[in-house]
Each structure stands twice: as C-alpha cells, then as structure tokens.
Image: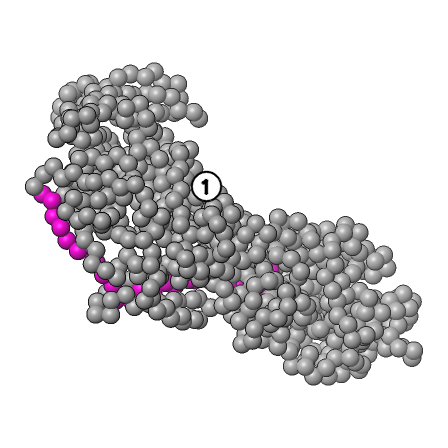
Amino acid sequence: MSKTLTYYTEFGNRPAIHAGREACYRIEIWGEGNNVAREISVDFDAPAMIEWAEVAKLDPVQGSALTLRLVSESDREFVGLYTVEEGAWRVDIYRNDDLYWRGSIDTELYEEPYSTSSGYVVEVTASDLGPADRTDFDLTGRHTIEDVIRHCLLCTAIADMEQAISISTSLPDAKEPLSLSDLYVNTANFYDEDGEPMTCREVLEEVLRPFALRLVQRNGVVHIFDLNAASAWPSTEVCWISNDARMGVDVTYNKVKVLLSTYSDANGCDGSLEHDEVLKGSAGDLYYTGERDHQAIGSPGFRVASGQEQHPQLEICNGALVCRMDAEWSGSDTAGVVWQYMGLKALGSGYQCMITRDGDNWPTAMTSGTFVPIAKTRRHLSLDPYQPVYVGSSAGGEVYTGAQLRVSLDLLLDTRYNPFEDAGADNGGTQYGKALDIPASVRIPVQIVCRNIDGEIAYLYNNDSFVSSYSYTGGEGQWIPYTAADLAKNICWLQYYDWDDWNGKSPVGGWVANRQSIGDPKATTKTMKKRGDGYYIPMPPCVGSVELWVGKGFGVIVDGSDGWLPNTAVRQSDAWDKFVSHLRWLAYRNPKIDLVKSSGKDLTGSDLEDSAYIVRTAKEELSIDTIVGTPGDRALPTSRAMMTLGDGRQIRRMTRAGVTDRIERLLIGTAYSQYAGHNTVLSGTAELVPDMPAMTDASAPGERYIMLSDRQNLAADTSEIRMVRFVGDSYEGVEITKTTQG
C-alpha cells in the first residue's frame, strides 16, 4: 500500500556561534492509506535528535536513530503511530528543502503520559536500518554484491535514496576501482545448515566487511566507503563550542587475525532421503519372509511404506514412488525411490502387494532407448571446474585433474520376497539361484546433467558407446553439449558388477553400490578396485552445477558363448525370462555426486586464517571473521565463500594501495594501517556537521579524522561527536602468516 503524508512540522535551528548557518527543517511523517496531512507541534528545545551509535574503525555498518519530541495537543493524538508492521510509518527530515535523514518508526514501541490529557510531550523513535535487524534475508541464487545490498535495504526506508560509493579496491590490472555490480556471490552462504537465514543487517555486514567498507546514511545520502578512499576526501575542520572536549588514544592491538570460512562442501548434489522424513503419516505394511503354494509362511521381516511425495532434495516424477523401509526383524531403516516390489504382507494372503509402475511391460526403457526420468536430485551446489583444489600438487591444464566427480546410486534388484534374509525354499530360493547364475553385470540408465551459471542445461555426460556394447576400448565417457534429443535418449549408464567374480557371480541381491562404468567388467583394474565404489568422471567443462537423474528400467549383461550378448539378444534368451519374470524388488536410494581426489579419497575444504602482528607489546587481538572472500587454492570448487565474475570464474586477487593479494590479506593491511600508530581520539560538543567528510582539527595540522559516533540536536545546531585519526592504507612492514584450519 502506498504512503501518504499524515503529519508535518517545521522549525529553525539556533546556531551557537557562527552566523550564516541558519537552517530550516521540515519533518514529515508518512503512513499507509489515504490520510489528510495536518501540521503538528514539537518540543521547542529538542524537537529532533539523530544519533549514530559508536562503531569501531572497521565496522561495516553504522545505523542511525531518530528521537522526535511531539507535543500532543489532545489526549492520545499520536497513539496511531504505534504499529507492529515493519515500515508502516516513515519519517523524512528535510534541511533547507533537501532530504537530510530518512527512517522508519520503530515497531511495538509507544509510550505517553497517562495522567495528562493534553499539552504533553510524546517521544517517537525511528531508525534507518532497524528493519534490517528484524527482517530475514530471503534472496536465493547467484547475485551481485550490489544486488544483495539493494535487496537488504528493501525493508528499510533508505532503499531508494541516493548512494555515494567510495571504494579504493580494484581488480588486478584494472584502471578504475571495482564496481560492486561486477562481483557475484552465492546467497546460499547466508543460510545455515537448517536453511535458517541471516537477517538483512547481518548479510550487509558480511558482504561489506571483506573490503573494509562501511555503509552509513548522512545528509540524505547512503555512503559506502573504505578508509583508504576516505583519506582523499575533502575535509572539514571541527568547531568545538563547549568546554567538554576531550582527547584520548584509540585502542591498539597485538595482532590481527582474519578467518575466512570457506563453506566448502564436497557434495555436488545429494538426493538422499532421510528415513524419518519420508511418509511420516504412514505406518507401512509388514512383509514376511517365505511362501509355499502362494501362501505366506515363516517369520515377519520389515515394514514398507510407499506413496507419492516430494522432497526438497529429490524430485520424484513419471509415476515413481518414495518408499520407507522400517527394520523390524530384517534389514535396516532406510528410504529411497521404488519402481516395483512384490512381497508377502499377510499370512495366507498370497501375492497381495505387487506394485509395478509399468504394468506387465517393464522395463520398457530397455527396448525403446528412451530415457524416462523417475527421480532428479534437487539440492546442488555451485561448482567451478577451474578452481584449483589443493591436494598436494599444483594445477595443470585448464581443468584441474586433482579433483573429479564420483557418481553414486544404491540399487535394490532382487528376486527374493525378503531381500534381507538368506534365500531358501520359502524365500524365492529357486529363482534367486537362477538369477545368480545369469547376469554378470547390470546397468541403470541415468543422465548426469551440468547446468551453467544461469541455470540452463549446458552439458550431458555420455558413456553409451562402450557401456551399451559391453566393450572396453581404454577410453572414458565425455561431456557433450546439451541437446534435447540427447536428454531424451539413454546415453549414460551406471554399472553394477562384482569386483572379484564378475563372470560368475550376480552383482545384485540386497542393496548394492555401482562401480566404475567400464563396459566389459573384465577390464577393471586393481586401481579401480582400490579407489572404491562409484563412477568417477572428470569435472564438467563449464562453471555451474551438476545433477543426477535416474531413469526407469535396467539392462542385464550376460556372458554368451560369443562374448557379451547385446540387449535385444538377452531379452530373447532364457536368461531374461528367468531373471525378470521372478524379479520382486527394484528400488534406488542415495543418488549423489561428490567431489573427490583423483585417488578416490574424499575432499575436505579448509577455513583460512591469515594473521599479522600490529604492536607486539600490546595485549589484545583483533579477530575478524568473514564468509565472503578470495579463498584461492585452499577451497573446493563448491566453496560458497568465493566471489566470482559474471562468467562464474573465481576472483582470486584484488588490488588496494598498490598491493595485489587475496582480499583477506588486504584487510589485514588496512587493519595494520589503522591500528599500528598513535591514533588520537577527539570527542566533545561541536557545531553540527551535516555531511560525511574527513574531519580535521586546528590543533593537529595534517591529521585527518573519521566519525565514530555523532549525536545531533538539529534545533541547537550541535553535534556530540567522537572521531578518530585515520590514514590511508600502507602495507610497509606487514608480515602476514597463513594457517589452514580443519
């Protein structure tokens, strides 16, 4: 709802010393709805006070608060200013017809004298950044820092105010200071592991802190600046007007430490379902072990619940069902996706639980060659294949070979009624024995999808040439440019076989893991076995994200007299009938893509701590924690802390004051510059300073000061200020050490 002017008043200031400083102030209070504006009265001595609470030199955000002293001419005249809705009332202050300050009346705060019916003063408070403290950040995806700042300010009254940007940091070799519209961040960084967001105020601090920037509203303008840039600003000499002026010394530090949390996650995508989160309202059916003459006998086994349900990490599609297995006497608690199961759920009931999503014609995908997805991973992380990964060796080539992807999918393909108990005469033993003798390898159709930074499918992984023909030519699969035709075909397979007895033992029975997709299992090597389960593939050729789509159907590979039988021949053989006609379970779980080392060992990201001594004889340390920065070669390609350019490439270095290094080290240089010397602090009552200048003092020629705090009485034309000496950045003498944590 749009706002209309509701209350207004005007007053002039009373300059304490110098003539020519007269100013006329106009206060406007805007509320929602169609209001009729009316003039109100204010307290003569102090109608409006604006306070910028004290911050340290390197604090990234400095908010301000307004106290209005309104005179209530009638009982409860201003009680309507009480609100619980953020931003319902806006206050604009004009100085000589130019916007001077803007903010929102604080919510849930209102108090006035109750024993007086009229002519009493009501204090109303407002703040410029208060709403950002109480508003959760809700932006998702990849955005520029400029967009993030703008979004964080949307909940405040200063969102559409003029901005003045003073940044001295630049990209390496750039002639101009960097623009915050050129730097991209991953907003997933601003949510915790449970998906709980930071507040907008906290996000503002996190994106400004690495650059030593500060955001503050002064004189109708939102300033974003760093001290190195401010050292070149025009200056204003402070005019003390009281005998309360004091001189002190700013705090100093023994050492400065900058910790960058890289938030490096080795999971490219993970569609694993949590057992306790699946089909919470369903108890499931109890399944038994054994049958004779189509009548269930034997002991109870486990419970299965299945149904149509979506989950944040996994999209279920084309008729597939989620399932939850509860271990009663058999198996273990787990959850996944089911395409068919046929068990015994009551004594004497026979086959009462057959569920297949393809009728009697499954798996049709093997005959048509058409890829039909039944599950797609949803939760995926941004991934930069050009990001070097520190594994003890240096990068080589454009795509670093020290990191690769491991594609995993557990498969339940079984002919037993109870796949978690031994086969016997009453548990499908005859059919299970036949099944063990038939398939030497099983393959599952999948699509390994790479999306670019815009979320569009860019590449697919193709290994069909050797997996489908069961041949091994020494080659590997490859990433191919996306086409809709390829996405609709079976071009990629996950393969299941036994490492040690691939030609004599079935790879299926109970939950099994996929192995390296290689076509002919006899071509496996000791290195592959040592590396372990999963399908290891190279990083994709573009910056973006990866997903794993599971397709319906499966293929059986049989070792015939003339080698591996092609799929059509298998379907026409007795082997297919013996296996498929007695198949009772087809289910999947834990679809995921992990980042691993070339050896197959897990990759772990490290937090980075840089430090430097400032004054070795001082006691206190300055600790600065950041979550956005330039981790360099110590972060995984999925690091949420990385800043990137528009094309997704990580920014590894920046330049400030003639020095090019990681932004965390530049921040250390700024801290060293500001705290290494003798830094005078001046405080007291002075003539009001409207602007955001660098300050000087007549008693200290050549020194420049920056405001730490300011409390302005607009009518009295005074500022109660506290300001500190500051300098431009200088990195001479800084000795930085680096430590990797965790």
Q: Nearer the viewer, residue 396 or 624?
A: 396
395, above or below 83, in the image: below
Position of residue 402 measured from the top left corner of the image (x, y, whole percent) = 60, 72
x and y percentages locating residue 559 in the rendered image: 86, 77
Toward the left, the furthest residue is 243
User: Left or right: 506 with respect to 17?
Assistant: right
Q: Is residue 348 above or below residue 65?
A: below
Residue at point 39% right, 56% down?
657
| Residue 97 seen in the figure | yes
Looking at the rendered image, the quarter that the C terminus falls into is bottom left
Please name the residue shown 68% across and 57% down the image: 449
Q: Quadrant of residue 125?
A: top left
Relative to 537, say whether 433 is above or below.
below
In x, y percent, where is residue 683?
A: 16, 46
Query: Which amino acid, mark 1?
Result: His
Mark 1 is surrounded, within 10 Å at the Cα level, by few (under 14), some (14 to 19) or many (20 or more) other residues, namely some
Give 184 or 267, whichever is nearer the viewer.
Answer: 184
Quadrant of the snapshot with the N terminus: top left
State the image coordinates of residue 448 (x, y, percent, origin top left): 69, 60
Q: Quadrant of residue 719?
A: top left
Find the magenta span and give its range. 244-270
Residue 559 is covered by the magenta coloring: no
Residue receiving disc 1: 151
Q: Which residue: 56% across, 67% down?
A: 388
Of 573 and 419, nearer the camera is: 573
